[in-house]
Amino acid sequence: MINYLYLHVPFCKTICGYCDFCHYIYNKNKVNQWLECLKTEIESKKINKKLKTIYIGGGTPTSLNEEELDKLLSLLKPYSKNIIEYTIEANPETITEEKVLIFKKYGINRVSIGVQSSDDKLLKIMNRRHNFESVKECIKLLKKHKINNISVDFMYGLPFQTMDDLNKSLHDFITLDVPHISIYSLTIEENTPFYKRGYKKMDDDLEADMYDRIIDFLRLNGYAQYEISSFCKDDLKSIHNMAYWNYEDFYGISMSASGKNKNLRYDNTKNFNKYLKKEYIENEIYLSKNDEMFEYIMMGFRLKDGFDYLKFDKKFKISFLKRYELILNDLLKNGLIAVEGKYIKCSEKGYKLLNNVLEKFLIGDS
């Protein structure tokens, strides 16, 4: 039984300089067409009506107006009765009190806000349409309506960003008093505005220094790192994202969404016209047992506490310790992993060299 659902809203008011996600500039007619097709797609799938989490991402879900947002959430209402965590992504400039009341009406209890930086100069370079004052107002509004489980995105490695800029943003973010912070290093993908402007990736050493600074600062200010890019207070981890890292199955709904059902991974189309024709799925990949085992390890090592290797044994009906004995001995000897009871995790040293650790597990079928 699948307990987790991701739904992608492919609309934005503006296009950010770094964004490579599926997105279309908001258009009322297109939104109405999309909502009608979305209704058909949802009805065509046998979705578990006792979901544990729903995550609405994008794009910018809150680029929809109040009527459109209400219609979207009404489509998911039959599946949200037992929800533990119901998340929606939002941009500060698109939040209104009316939209927050709609969140409350449908049981949304977690909001992830695309903040990225407190530096208005850097926000402008990214083509973000908010400033840091509007972020504070947005959080104040959410808390007014008792939505306190708030996550903010923090981006580093930005064009022209200095260590001083980073430090100021870190201090500013702490004043927001939110329980969750997700951090992202800028990657410059082809076809993004940043790529077209000729911006280059930040020097690796400076980027690594920034990552270390973020970790140290957040730890000193009460945030526990529980995943390579995720920090929380009061154990308010993202339940939905934990499902990914624990290699659970999940539904992917709408354009550009991905899903996983046992050994089938699928990607929905990014093409608006195909979606309107109900040609929802673009790619299907059937994973081999070896693929699944590697992905399980890859996702599990992202977690600070690692993963339970006995669950691996049960899932794949193979001994993790025996299959990877030589690899594990080598990684232990070099201080890159640690074993604590039934959990295997990266050491502090290994966490910084995660890709190197994972490469060791790229072995063929046995």
Image (cartoon, helix red, strand yellow):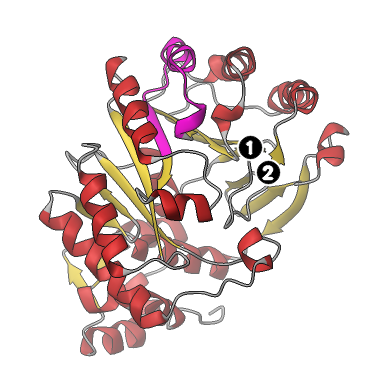
Q: Amino acid at mark 1?
A: Cys
**Tag 1 residue:** 12
Q: Which residues are magenta?
A: 92-113
Residue at (29% x, 85% y) in the render: 331
Q: Nearer the viewer, residue 196 or 348?
A: 196
Q: Is residue 320 above or below residue 152?
A: below
Q: Is residue 254 visible?
A: yes
> Residue at left 26%, top 68%?
344
Q: Quadrant of residue 346?
A: bottom left
Mark 1 to mark 2 CA distance (whole Å): 6 Å
Q: Residues within 10 Å of mark 2 (few under 14, many from 20)?
A: many
Q: Position of residue 282 (x, y in %)?
A: 78, 50
Q: Is 167 situated above or below 173?
A: below
Residue 155 in picture, x, y percent from top left:
40, 56
> Disc 2 residue type?
His
Residue 1: tell me if it is visible: no
**Residue depicted at x 86% and y 40%:** 274
Mark 1 and mark 2 residues within 8 Å of each other at the beta carbon: yes
- x and y percent of residue 13 in the render? 63, 35
Q: Residues within 10 Å of mark 1 (few under 14, many from 20)?
A: many
Going by the picture, which residue comes out furthest to the front? 121
Q: Of label 1 and label 2, which has the lower sequence position?
A: 1
Residue to which mark 2 is pinned: 23
Q: Nearer the viewer, residue 139 or 342?
A: 139
Q: Residue 98 lies in magenta, yes or no?
A: yes
Judge whether residue 66 is colored magenta.
Answer: no
How many marks the image carries: the answer is: 2
User: In terms of secondary structure, where does tag 2 sit?
Assistant: loop
